[in-house]
Amino acid sequence: MAIPEALAGTNGPIVIRFRFEQRTKSNGFVDFMPDSVLASGQVELDNDQAIPRTCDLVLRAAELPSGFDPLRSLIAVFAEVLDDGAFVRFPIGLFRLTNPSDDITPSPEDTIAFRGSDVTYFLQKDKQDGPFELPAGTNYIEAVESILTTLGLVHDLPPLAGTTPIAFVWEQGTPSLTIVNQLLKGIDHFQIAPDGEGTFRTAPRVAPRGVAPDVLYTTEVEPRFLIPPFGEKQTEATIPNIVLASIQDPNRAAAFGSAENADPDSLLSTFRTETTYAEITMDRAANVATLLSIAEYELLLASGVSDNAILRTVLDPRRTSNEVYRLTVEDDEVGTKWRVRGWTLPLRTGVPMRHNVQRAADFIVTASS
């Protein structure tokens, strides 16, 4: 039996257990935690938030290891799936916990509720003690890697030749997370996000229509992950059909670009409805070509807001950041692509996993500068 069939219960009962370990922020092992420590909990991913993964854990106080300090130790959460008589482990998050709200004396009946943030927390909390400057000609990706390495954070980023066109300066007190994500946005990459093991990753932002889907969920053939009903929700928000992008930093040449949905087959296009604008300023953009690429992606992203859905599936701990699903739902969808905005994975079996998805906009974009 393969992992997809084991997760979906194609050939028998679904067997998943959850394990917890104390780790360092670089994912170094510290200590085990007993299986019985968890009373309840869930892990959430939100691709639109600066700290993408969070968790809510209710832990049995009497089961916590002696001397456990949530402000010093991080908790790694794992799902282990039984497949052909052996458990296969999937990491689903490395979290820094917040202090519990109540100071209690542990007893077998006591539980403590913790909120946890993934290791992006350390980037957000680290702030510049003076102006932070990157010289002109600095490689964008290497600058991000240097910040992560200085903070002792593990990373695996794709190489890129792009360099800063001028010296970039951030003022005192700027969080390192702001610097990192502005640099990545400047080369049209996804914001920084750790995977289930706490390794920071990014990738070029490519419109969902142009990428291979990360998973196929279907109601028609095994393995069947989807749990009915499948419900779409139309949003009546104002959707832009033109994005105006600009570079307005007085220290570099001004630049302007636009991305327009003028596709006559699109109901949201300037050809079919009134013109609606959105404006973005991208002073950290590497060049005009990148500025146009950013405008195009932002237009496609905004257009997808009009068509959202909530999926329910059996637990699928393979899921990670910035994925695209292909959905085939009887009488509803035939191989359509959906951008994943986020998901909620309950840390118990028998409870559905919820996915917040957005239909991948598919229209011809006209870009100009």
Image: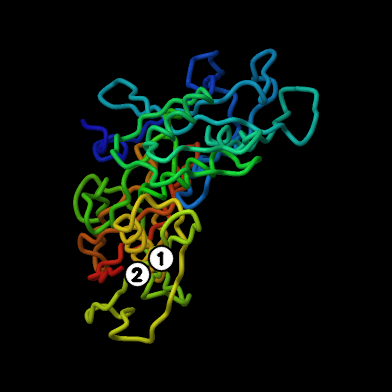
Residue that mark 1 sits on: 245
- x 25%, y 24%: residue: 84
Q: In front: 155, or 33? A: 155
Q: Is residue 41 depicted above or below 275 in this figure?
A: above
Q: Quadrant of residue 258?
A: bottom left
Q: Of the residues under marks 1 and 2, which one precedes in the sequence? A: 1
- Residue 104 location (% of width, % of height): 80, 27
Q: Is residue 200 depicted above or below 364 in this figure?
A: above
- Residue 122 visible to the viewer: yes
User: Label 2's element?
Assistant: strand
- Residue 41 visible to the viewer: no
Q: Residues within 10 Å of mark 2 (few under 14, many from 20)?
A: many
- x 30%, y 20%: residue: 86
Which quadrant would the C terminus be assigned to in this image? bottom left
Q: In front: 200, or 97? A: 200
- Residue 69 location (% of width, % of height): 68, 21
Amino acid under disc 2: Ser
Does the CB distance between marks 1 and 2 fall below 8 Å? yes
346 with respect to 268 (left or right) = right
109 with respect to 239 (left or right) = right
Residue that mark 2 sits on: 258
Q: Is residue 273 depicted above or below 36 in this figure?
A: below
Q: Quadrant of residue 178?
A: top right
User: Label 1's element?
Assistant: strand
Q: Which mark is residue 98?
A: none
- Residue 328 location (% of width, % of height): 23, 59
